[in-house]
Amino acid sequence: MPERQISYREAVAEAIKEEIARDDRVFLMGEDVGVLGGAFGSTKGVYDAFGGERVLDTPISETAIVGYALGAAMAGMRPIAEIMRVDWMTICMDEIVNQTAKMRFLSGGHPDVALVIRAAAEGGIGLGGQHSQSFEAWFVHIPGLKVVMPSTPYDVKGLLKSAVRDPNPVIFLEPGVLYGVSGPVPEEEYVIPLGKAEVKREGKDITIVAWGTLLPKTLNAAQTLANEGIEAEVVDPRTLRPLDIDTIIDSVKKTGRLIIAHEAMKTGGVGAEIAALVQERAFDHLDAPIKRVATPDVIIPVNRSLERLVLPQEDTVVEAVKSICS
Amino acid sequence: MPERQISYREAVAEAIKEEIARDDRVFLMGEDVGVLGGAFGSTKGVYDAFGGERVLDTPISETAIVGYALGAAMAGMRPIAEIMRVDWMTICMDEIVNQTAKMRFLSGGHPDVALVIRAAAEGGIGLGGQHSQSFEAWFVHIPGLKVVMPSTPYDVKGLLKSAVRDPNPVIFLEPGVLYGVSGPVPEEEYVIPLGKAEVKREGKDITIVAWGTLLPKTLNAAQTLANEGIEAEVVDPRTLRPLDIDTIIDSVKKTGRLIIAHEAMKTGGVGAEIAALVQERAFDHLDAPIKRVATPDVIIPVNRSLERLVLPQEDTVVEAVKSICS
Amino acid sequence: MPLTKEALLNMYRRMLTIRHFEEGITEFSRQGLVPGTGHVSIGEEAVAVGSCSALGDKDYIISTHRAHGHLLARGADINVILAEVLGKATGCTGGKGGSMHLSDFSRQILGTNGIVGAGINIAGGVGLAIKMRQTGQICLGFFGDGAANRGTFHEGLNMAAVLQVPTVFVCTNNQYGLSMPQCKACGNIDISARANGYGMPGYRVDGTDVIAVYEAVKSAVDRARDGEGPSLIEAVSYRLRGHSMRMDQMPGGSDYRPNGEVEDWAENKDPLKIFRSKLKELGYINEKEAEQLDAECRQLFESAADFALNSPEPEPETAFTWIYAPEGVK
Amino acid sequence: MPLTKEALLNMYRRMLTIRHFEEGITEFSRQGLVPGTGHVSIGEEAVAVGSCSALGDKDYIISTHRAHGHLLARGADINVILAEVLGKATGCTGGKGGSMHLSDFSRQILGTNGIVGAGINIAGGVGLAIKMRQTGQICLGFFGDGAANRGTFHEGLNMAAVLQVPTVFVCTNNQYGLSMPQCKACGNIDISARANGYGMPGYRVDGTDVIAVYEAVKSAVDRARDGEGPSLIEAVSYRLRGHSMRMDQMPGGSDYRPNGEVEDWAENKDPLKIFRSKLKELGYINEKEAEQLDAECRQLFESAADFALNSPEPEPETAFTWIYAPEGVK
Ligand SMILES: Cc1ncc(C[n+]2csc(CCOP(=O)(O)OP(=O)(O)O)c2C)c(N)n1
Ligand SMILES: Cc1ncc(C[n+]2csc(CCOP(=O)(O)OP(=O)(O)O)c2C)c(N)n1
Ligand SMILES: [Mg+2]
Ligand SMILES: [Mg+2]
């Protein structure tokens, strides 16, 4: 029997529905998550299944969405809060960073700080400078948070379910451009542990660590490279904090070369952290400098060709690989 | 004649006063910056000199402080906005990142986006988890911003004056624990260009890039190391965006070894970016892995000995150097 | 001082221009010509035109994601605006900002915003600069009913009252914030009632009546110009289309509204229909003239379309400009 | 139902305990025993005690940086609180949070906050959980007049009204936000007037009168418990000391107040003096009993001081715990 195919957005909605059904402490809140089913359709059907008691449409009040979710968690609930896009997590960084991430510590080990804060991330759909960003690097810098960024329907479902069950606050970033992409997702329940990378493709010549929209682009690039005789190993960290650095180091020890590919801006992106860690821990195994493929430091334009130009593409990955595999 | 010595906080106030006097578009706004002279005393005397027309005490409204400063800049003023501590820049990240940093681009090249947003940064005075952080890594990730973090009275005065005159938005971070530290500052006017590092100490055995409170600690460490025969070159980037990477690379080419020391959390700190850049551009010159000295990923505690324990100290730098200089 | 016939006809012309522009781009969007998305304000034209008609030439405006109407009401170049919506090099940001980032400095239109509620503080800050520079201008800041629930509304209005800046805050209450009915998003549906909390006058006005909007905004503008500080005006209207052109094309993208609600407003409270009747009543226009005006305004869009569709795509290099000031600018 | 003599004396005892605690730590701070800083609420005891006396045993509170009074009014262990202020291992966060991060889960005190205004949304969220879990509790959220100008106030109160959560918002208007006089920070000095904008009842009450505070909060608590939603109470009092113990020790750290203002309030509106007179008037206490009570409460502090001063410093390992949940917790 061929495996069931569903879209990334359906996988998100399915995970949320299953978790709400499983645990009566779990609920969903955010702007337009209920009746409409999400501005990007990623919570479609959740309201129909559970109604307004477990699915709260909120006013446009990002600080209140996260603050309320945190308060509700502290009083025993397990909220899934949606901020429509990571770009406007800028509005509730105090609630995320100073409150949620530190609540356990600052309240003397309070046990109930279990909440998931989801948002669409990255660009690629012509929405411009304030709707195309990716701030995973900010959250990776914050002790107390976990940061997850899955790239396939299978991963997003399994990781979102784990995130909901995790006793820590989890920032859960969903690349908006992938919502419509389908892939195999079994009917049976499963979870994927946070903090485990997956080798999405094996190879011996170079390691490419990629996540978000760069993961599918990198897998395509690896195919192209294979046709030219270069076998790239593609590692998807899936969780960026805690980072499964061991899997990355193991791969680099095998290949001797590393590229990190992400859509966030190059300067100060998570690519820098991975590069720093790998050169520190696998210095003698590196046959070439580690390279980063990322958006050059610009503001994402709306015009389609300009947007395509600045965002790293399959080609960008191919060229970067060739530049250090010669 | 011996050079005049003034404190870091006096140097800040002096720079602000000189710039307000120089340019009638310049004004100061923020919480408690006026009558009180700043919660940390860094604007003492400014209100007395210019009064309430050019020095605005505001309500506790961080989004309005930055949003108003931006609006005022767009209509031709040159505001210096103070957010008391970088920890609560979390509140106005939309205003900083989505509005201020992108305003020139998103308004088609608008010429007037000249404002400085100042804040005290880093810990060391027992103020705990929400009052001891350092988020320079977040701002370094944002195209459109400049980021400055000076460590001496001389530098802070010269750089703040340049920041006020710069046509771009500048995030200006002042390590709170250094406000009381004095150093030579000439009576005559001077400015220091943004984007230029300074070699604060020459040496041939290892390069240490350090800023914020880690700069004075590193200079002390270098002294200790010199006594043991290790000559460290200490580079203070002063501006973190744009980063004067050339000065750092030149130094590493000379010494072959690099440590980056900052007080911000290690994971995702600016140290990662510098390590990534240096290994990329000076791969063949490195005799040892680049190491980072930083706060391990914790939440800063109030208790004095715990705080001292988690923040990197002079000793931490000394030990890190020894670990790669043997 | 009542509005002259000429002024009123001019207002009607602007409203028609906005309507044609937005119907036109909706069609362009269906054809895939609009990158990203765009938010039309069909049904809200009276707020844009009533408000902007109350401004002097030198006054500033700051607007939102739903801004075409504000720009056109303020007299921005229709060619440039349309080119921007289509992401063309001749647009006001050279196709880089798109429909959510329109501006025209020659008309003191300082920009629009993709972040709901972010313009409120900026509008306050423009008012602050005006006050400090004593230029006698005022700044008008538009925002929506949804934005009124953001913290920026609170901080921005209180700060405006405290600093007594000459900013007029105009809330277009089109009764929805995306899918959220305003009556479910606000504890008190009367947004203008919030003004009292800041010690500022608040007025609630029928936003389908362009003259009523004009009068309310005009008195707030006069007040601000006289140094008496900011005001809040809530103009109640209705969004006759979906939240965005993109969502309108999505299946179920508008299912959140009660049956018949849109049709009812379109039938009975379309500001263009209402104003046309009023003008006829006043004897300022007859059916034939009205149709001619309509055709003229449609023609304005057609010729803008000619311009914009034939405009070049931006050059690749432009993706890298305007991020920092060019070196040497002071 | 009027408060009994016993209840009133108990309230007075709590107020005295707070006063002695805060005078005591002010002295400790001068001696360099308090790491960082701390914010005493001398002059505001009636708000803390009046409010907390209106709560049932199971009800939650969320507080601010100026929280000792709230904790003690709610019955938290004075030893543990004092140890925390001194950064000792026996404190509620083991000396890691300090004076701005006090909590006592056994008494539903869910925490205090170093970020002005951040607790407002959290208090709303606790109310939301109560509502969803139908536990019949309520949550009381304290904050200051300065915090009332933050966006979180606006978003939090509106959201509370929309979701009809059983949260009572208590604003201690002590007339200053650090150096900023409330009358210069708020466009309208009546903070309770803002409640109407959210469709929620707002009351302004004399915050130096513990019974008045009790009554206002009690009626809001009853209302919330009856499922009628949130309320806002503004209790007007005065901060008799400097903003923080640290600033009080800095030269010029309190120069922003008009001459004689502090003295005037201390003389005429000290809530302890006022309440003592009231109790005497009622014949519930005489001078000797009052002095005895005073000594008892002072003694409470002394013995807490014994405990806290003799408590160990935290172990170094503790700097690394509580950042994440221990593995395996579900
Ligand atoms: C801070 C923020 N939150 C959410 C969004 C997504 N969003 C875009 S427009 C909109 C609705 C805004 O409602 P309103 O202010 O009433 O303006 P309208 O769209 O009705 O003109 C939402 C939720 C956003 N762009 N910014
Ligand atoms: C968001 C934020 N802004 C500024 C500060 C610095 N600060 C601490 S307390 C305070 C005054 C708060 O005033 P109010 O809310 O009236 O409380 P009070 O101190 O009077 O009890 C300020 C400005 C902070 N901690 N958090
Ligand atoms: Mg609306
Ligand atoms: Mg106060």
Image: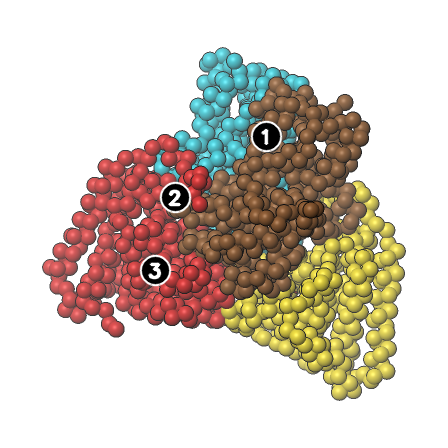
Chain colours: A cyan, B brown, C red, D yellow
Image position of B304 with respect to C208: above or below: above
Q: Are marks 1 and 3 in contact (CB under 8 Å)?
A: no
Q: Is residue B198 visible?
A: yes
Q: Which mark is residue B247?
A: 1
Three-letter amino acid code of the residue under disc 1: Thr
Residue C36, picture quadrant: top left
Q: Earlier in the sequence, mark 1 or mark 2?
A: 2
Left or right: where does residue C217 sit relative to residue A67? left
The residue at 37%/40% (across/down) is: C96
Three-letter amino acid code of the residue under disc 2: Gly
Three-letter amino acid code of the residue under disc 3: Asp
How many marks on residues?
A: 3
Foreground residue among B231 and A170: B231
Q: Which residue is mark 2?
A: B109
Q: Marks 1 and 3, Cα distance to the nearest angstrom?
A: 48 Å
Give coordinates of residue D5: x percent, y percent: 77, 81
Give coordinates of residue A283: x percent, y percent: 66, 21
Q: Which mark is residue C126?
A: none
The residue at 53%/18% (across/down) is: A324
Foreground residue among D139 and D292: D292
Residue extending furthest toward the front = B1
Residue B294, picture quadrant: top right
Q: Residues within 10 Å of mark 3 (few under 14, many from 20)?
A: many
Quadrant that contains the C terminus of chain D: top right
Q: Which mark is residue C59?
A: 3
Give coordinates of residue D70: x percent, y percent: 71, 65
The residue at 37%/44% (across/down) is: B108
Quadrant that contains the N terminus of chain D: bottom right
Q: For mark 2, give the secondary structure.
A: loop
Q: Chain of mark 2?
A: B
Image position of D10 with respect to B52: above or below: below
